[in-house]
Amino acid sequence: MRFRLTGNRRWSFAHAFTLIELLVVIAIIAILAALLLPVLSRAKMRAQTAACLNNLEELEQCCHLYSNDFNDYLVPNQVGGFVSAPTTNDVLSSVTNVNSWCPGLAPYDTTPGNVEIGLLFPYDKSTAIYHCPADLSTVDGYPDLPRTRSYCMDISLGCADTASTYYKYTDILQQSPDHLFVFIDTQENDIYDATFGIFSADSYYADYWLDVPADRHDQGANLSFADGHVEHWSWRAPKITYGPFWPADSTGDLQDLQKLQQYIKPGVEEF
């Protein structure tokens, strides 16, 4: 605090911050920011999870509308990439199949064109419902271009490339529809075609991941189910992909795989 003489010779007070006072204010702001940022981050994550769940619920409703229009048949679910056996030298081979709920290959689609020619698009003409808001991955070779799709459909349903799959809703007799997942949030480094491949619990490769779910929702993923409901699942272990056909890399990872296997068609195989 200091005194200043005004033009009319009266004394007044003029306040100026000292360096120490400024440093104290800056420190307080930094502490408040440090306390608020985690809260804001968690709030943003919850909002993204809720939006992702809403996307999956919309896609699930589209599936039911499609079946209503096509005599109970499930929407076709393509396999666009596969390997012959679990070795690190196997490479994906592309299969073109436009007769699918969503054609195309997520890492390479530079436009929403493949989403728009998909068989579910007429039931909800919003390309946004195909993309998880927490998915920050971009199109290969285009670092500023977000991908158009984050989700895959369970190989248990409508997939002609597997020896065992459901083709109609009324075929789902071995398990309750609320115990069969349909769409799943897929790991951004693993997603390729629109089909989520997974081996059944009684398979020779039961301990291997074929496709890997996402873990971008606080080490968790979102799923929809054949009865129409959606869920958020938390994983015991982070989800990392090492390429096609890779064994679960920890006890927690294997437990996550085994949990997911309980929600597919028994005996399903991609061979």
Image (cartoon, rainbow, N blue to C red):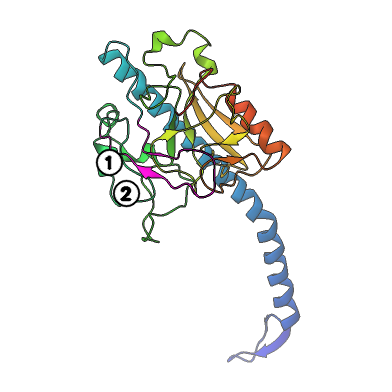
Label 1 neighbourhood size at 10 Å, few (<14), some (14-19), many (20+)? many
Please name the residue shown 25% across and 15% down the image.
Answer: 69
Label 2 neighbourhood size at 10 Å, few (<14), some (14-19), many (20+)? many
| Majority secondary structure of magenta residues | loop
Identify the residue position indicated by label 1 in the image: 114
- Given residues 122 and 9, the one toward you in this image is 122
Q: Is residue 223 left or right of residue 98?
A: right
Which stretch appears magenta? 78-98
- Given residues 265 and 142, the one toward you in this image is 265
Identified by mark 1, the residue type is Asn
The picture quadrant where one finds residue 24 is bottom right
| SS at mark 2 in the image | loop
Quadrant of image for the C terminus: top left
The picture quadrant where one finds residue 131 is top left
Q: Position of residue 172 (x, y in %)?
A: 45, 11
Identify the residue position indicated by label 2 in the image: 109
Whether the residues at callouts 1 and 2 have beta carbons within 8 Å, the answer is: yes
Q: Is residue 129 left or right of residue 118?
A: right
Q: Which label sits on residue 101? A: none
Does 157 appear above or below 153? above
Identified by mark 2, the residue type is Asp
| SS at mark 1 in the image | helix
- For the residues marked 1 and 2, what is the alpha-carbon distance in whole angstroms? 7 Å
Does 211 appear above or below 89? above
As for residue 83 lying within the magenta part, the answer is: yes
Does 212 appear above or below 165? below
Mark toward the start of the polypeptide (1 vs 2) = 2
Does 204 appear above or below 218? above
Please name the residue shown 41% across and 43% down the image.
Answer: 192
Q: Position of residue 97 (x, y in %)?
A: 28, 35
